[in-house]
Image (cartoon, rainbow, N blue to C red):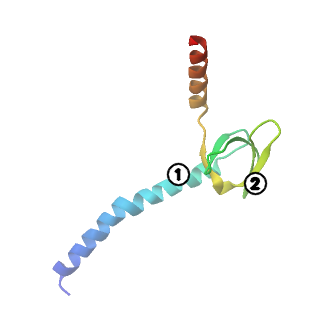
Amino acid sequence: MNLTQILPLIIIFGIFYFLLLRPQQKRQKERNAMLASLKKGDKVVTIGGLHGTIMDLTDERVTLKVNETTRLFFERSAINAVANQAEEKKEDQEKEETKEEK
């Protein structure tokens, strides 16, 4: 085979790697780091959109407190994101400001 015949395939593979595979691997590493750093008291959002506070966690499961009486068990991999406390405070302030305006 001639190098000119193989070169377009190599270029296409390179583009495919940098546009699809590499960003996906980076997101996966970030997600694994987030799941590894979970701790009691973190406010999280599950993949299904449920908001709760971590009450207990093991290597495989997480217990979320959704209200004063309800505790739900989830697989650790079902956690989608850790809610940023600064964003929550900001939302609370905005709610208070809208209440005061009414």
Q: Which residue is mark 2?
A: 58
Q: Are marks 1 and 2 in contact (CB under 8 Å)?
A: no
Residues packed near mark 2 inside 10 Å, few (<14), some (14 to 19) or many (20 plus): few
Give the residue furthest to the bottom: 1
N-terminal of the pair, mark 1 or mark 2, is 1
Q: Which residue is mark 1?
A: 30
Front one among 38 and 83: 83
Place residue 67 in its image quadrant: top right
The residue under the point 64% across, 56% down is: 77
Which numbered marker is on residue 92? none
Q: Amino acid at mark 2?
A: Thr
Q: Quadrant of the N terminus?
A: bottom left
For residue 35, above or below residue 97: below
- In the drawing, does residue 90 fall left or right of residue 21? right
SS of the residue under disc 1 = helix
x then y, percent, for residue 65: 76, 41
Q: Quadrant of the C terminus?
A: top right
x then y, percent, for residue 31: 55, 52
